[in-house]
Image (cartoon, helix red, strand yellow):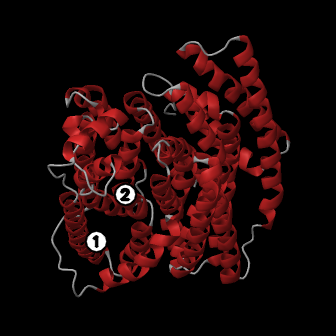
Amino acid sequence: MLKSSGAMGAATLSSRLLGVVRESLYAAFMGDGPVAGAFTIAFLIPNLFRRLLGEGALTAAFVPLFKEKERTEGEESMWKAANEVLSGLTIAAVVIIALVLLGISAALYLDRPDAVTVAARQLELQGAGVLSPTGAIGAGYLTAPTELMLRLLRIMFPYMLFICATAMFMGMLNSRGHFFVPAMGSTVLNVVMIACVLWVAPQWGATLDQQIFALAFAVLFAGVAQMLYQLPQLYREGFRLRWSPPWQSESVRAVVQRMLPGMMGVAAFQINVLLTQGIAWTFDDSKTINASFGYAVRLMELPQGLFGISLATYLLPTLAGIAADKDFPKFRRTLKQGLGHVYFANLLATGFLIVLSVPIIRFLFERKEFTEASTERASFALACLAPGLIAFSTVNILARAFYALGDMKTPMRISMFCLALNIFLTLWLIEPFKQGGLGIANSISAFMNAGLLFYALRRKLKYLEIGSLKTPFIQMAISAAIAAVIAYAGYRLWAETIGHANILARAGEVFTPMILATALYFTILTLLKNPQADEYIGLIASKLGRKNAPPETAP
């Protein structure tokens, strides 16, 4: 488990680190103002389909069927089912894209300025610093940032077609035992966007509201590149891309039946984020909450993707194969191991994101358009969102356990309830806490989601055999709390003695206390003979041992 998910984790780490570089460049380029908020919302909507499908419902519905076809009917039937599902997915995506683009175009058309109000509207927008006169297009019901968001969305929304196909290809490769190459596909998006923000966007126009459109076109280009990146490895596995009419396909019918309820189950975090961002966009006149909260989400996705999603992606085909063999004792043991490993890593990460939120945001983002006030807003959002990291990762793993068992409805019902709770909490907390309220609401609803999934899965399997995880979990939680206190003390000492006047000082302010606290965390758990720590250290030792071992000689 550690080796396979570790391979994917290494690829995910590369992708997420590039993602942090990308977000850092975004922050310097557009700060956290209205234009940044418009881009955040516009990208979040098509990107939700990557979350739903690439890391969620489509793979959760398709992978068990794909594995079952491979075991019971052979590879020819397996590849045929894949092409049928892919053909059906393409039809659905094209229809959705057409309807959404038509709706956006209609909204922009109906909001066209008239001769009487256009001059006044241009002066208003220019004075507000939201759009330049050349970018001012509306004088009707839509505000200027909303107008900009819709125009950006119209360009980026077709991205969902390519990323949905990419999701299919990744699920097929995961089912064939390939985790590293598919996970590296996300680096394509980051490389394209980094290149665009450095070299293309500054030349795209004279003002930020014009330059931002370069990033929108780059997203579309990156979607195509991500899809094409997966194909060579699939072709080596024997897959051939063919049009297969999906209308009468049993495979398509089975995937759709599983996928629709699954969308609300495995992608709870992403749907929560989209809903809370939508509420913030509606109620925040300054339009700073969306970008601030978006930066916090990106940072929390680093440990979530590295540990939670990597393990969950490994566990889905693994648990599906075990469930197909009806080996439920092994199913419970594998699930328990997965939870133990994700808790080991993410409890420590949670502590760091809470106590080091200010120096982390300052080091990564505070330059040019991203001011000290921007750091305060984003770090507050991160500190409020970080406690939910454990819950978000738990939901990812437990939802996939249900899907491996063929149950898509239970996670959906639980997520529907938690989504309603999240909306209520967001509406309640956004006024007093702004972007922090969004983080608190998401964290609380995520813990509720994880608790209800645990309860439902225990009823489904009669028992979970995770009682033995209680003591290691307490050990890890206490050790992580101690490490967090040490990290915070180290940060405050560094800030008072050295400060953060330059980039090296800011890096030391983050990484020095983090390294010391991590060493303490491993030391405490090793002395306590924590099983998860022993397994991680054993894997690292075996890797180092093989590298340092003398070459074998012939007798």
Residue 149 falls left or right of residue 382: left
Query: Does label 1 or label 2 sit earlier along the sequence?
Result: 2
Which residue is painted at 63% across and 62% down in the image? 425
Which callout, 1 or 2, points to the residue nearer the camera? 2
Observer-nearest of 252 and 91: 91
Q: Nearer the viewer, residue 28 or 184?
A: 28
Depicted 147 relative to depicted 397: above or below: above
At which x and y percent is residue 182?
37, 51
**Percent position of residue 10, x then y:** 49, 41
Q: Is residue 533 above or below residue 430?
A: above
Total numbered circles: 2
Q: Residue at x 56, y 35 (%)?
A: 546
Question: Looking at the image, is 545 positioned above or below residue 383?
Answer: above
State the residue in front, 382 or 290.
Answer: 290
| Residue 67 in which image quadrant | bottom left
Q: Is residue 397 visible?
A: no
Which residue is labeled 2 in the image? Answer: 45
Q: Is residue 212 left or right of residue 186?
A: left
